[in-house]
Amino acid sequence: MTPTNVSKGTAPLPILSIAAEAAQRLGAAGVLVMPEGPLEWDLVRSVTNGDVDFLLASSSDRQVEAIKKAGLTAIELEPTEAGIAERITLALIEAVANDLLKAGARVVVVYSGFEAEALDSITVIRLGEHLERLSARDLRALETSVPFETLKAVVDTAVEIGREGREGKAVGSLIVVGDVRNVLARTRPLGFDPFKGYRRKERNVRDLRVREAIKEIAQMDGAFIVARDGTVEAACRLIDAPVAGLTLPKGLGTRHWAAAAITAVTKAVAVVVSQSNGTVRLFQDGEVILRIAPMRHARAMKWQDAESEPAPPRERDRERERDRDKEKEKEKDKDKSPPAKSSENGPVAAPRSS
Ligand SMILES: Nc1ncnc2c1ncn2[C@@H]1O[C@H](COP(=O)(O)OP(=O)(O)OP(=O)(O)O)[C@@H](O)[C@H]1O
């Protein structure tokens, strides 16, 4: 018998072979591996055999690079203290977001369940309903006006702003991407621009540090203006574009109207984070084209088409709403306070002032 050289990097190979076989037998879409450290990636590739797709998730930049260099598919995870179940979920979500897996697919997952740093467990997961509408295709459809990578970086940043806020407070934001010359011509500075004076390569939204800076600056008033290549051209700009003739779902305020307006008169795409609830909306040609509902997980974006804005209420709900409105009217008469924002349940015409 030839002695085999078993190291930390090669020990998981048998379990990966079993996973590959299981995936084939079950007709699974692939095998997701959650290694806790470096493996012998070239050997891992020999196990994958080309018949089954292997996805290797890692939060280490070095490992991601090594995985890709070995010709394998890497899933980049954000570093997190979360438990294994949550990390598997995040990896699956990321895989679906990047079109590596489809919602509804069955996946064999290999992970470290018992012993730290040892790939010792296999489980089979069917990607659930909650991932159903998650797709990078929606963003790709917009690629004509803005490159996918830039749009994805901006949308990721927006989702993070909506989810994290700043210093315990909810934060909203407006980021206008593309057609910079025309966009800038329809905006004016609101005061100090924190990005002024930095070199182009120091202010690209694809750079994680720049994204952190955007999240910080998002607390200030005004819009970010981002070029097609991802360079932040300006921050804290007031958009001055006409809203006449536009319609938007009820309940959206001036930030959303500004986004609709600027995309109606330019070829830009605008990404808005609502301070009220963290929802991210994408605007193009003066309309909401995508709505991303806020979710708990780090990259858990739920892409929804604009048509899936909440439907108008049914008759019984309407009656209840009318009753509530009457109550509200009474309240208002009492304290003479200005009317509250209406709920987002249908289109309204543009307000008169822009
Ligand atoms: N024309 C504009 N250009 C740039 N930024 C704007 C413009 N109008 C509003 N904003 C930004 O939007 C912020 C909030 O406005 P408002 O509360 O009316 O927005 P909203 O659409 O209701 O969104 P949210 O859900 O975040 O409250 C302002 O403080 C400002 O920073």
Image: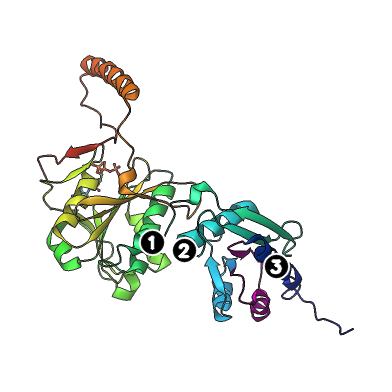
Q: The disc labelled 1 sits on which kind of residue? A: Arg
User: Badge 2 local density, few (<14 within 10 Å), some, or many (20+)?
Assistant: some
Magenta highlight on residue 47? yes
Position in image of residue 196 (x %, y %): 25, 67
Q: Which residue is mark 1?
A: 137
Magenta highlight on residue 179? no
Kindly check if marks 1 and 3 are in contact, taking CB atoms under 8 A apart as contact.
Answer: no
Position of 255 compared to 317: left or right? left
Position in image of residue 101 (x %, y %): 52, 62
Label 3: state its secondary structure.
helix
Whole-Å distance between the Cαs marked 1 and 2? 8 Å
State the image quarter where residue 136 is shown: bottom left
Span of residues in magenta:
28-54
Q: Which residue is mark 2?
A: 99
Kindly check if marks 1 and 2 are in contact, taking CB atoms under 8 A apart as contact.
Answer: yes
Q: Is residue 242 visible?
A: yes
Q: Which residue is mark 3?
A: 21
Which residue is painted at 16% across and 63% down in the image?
184
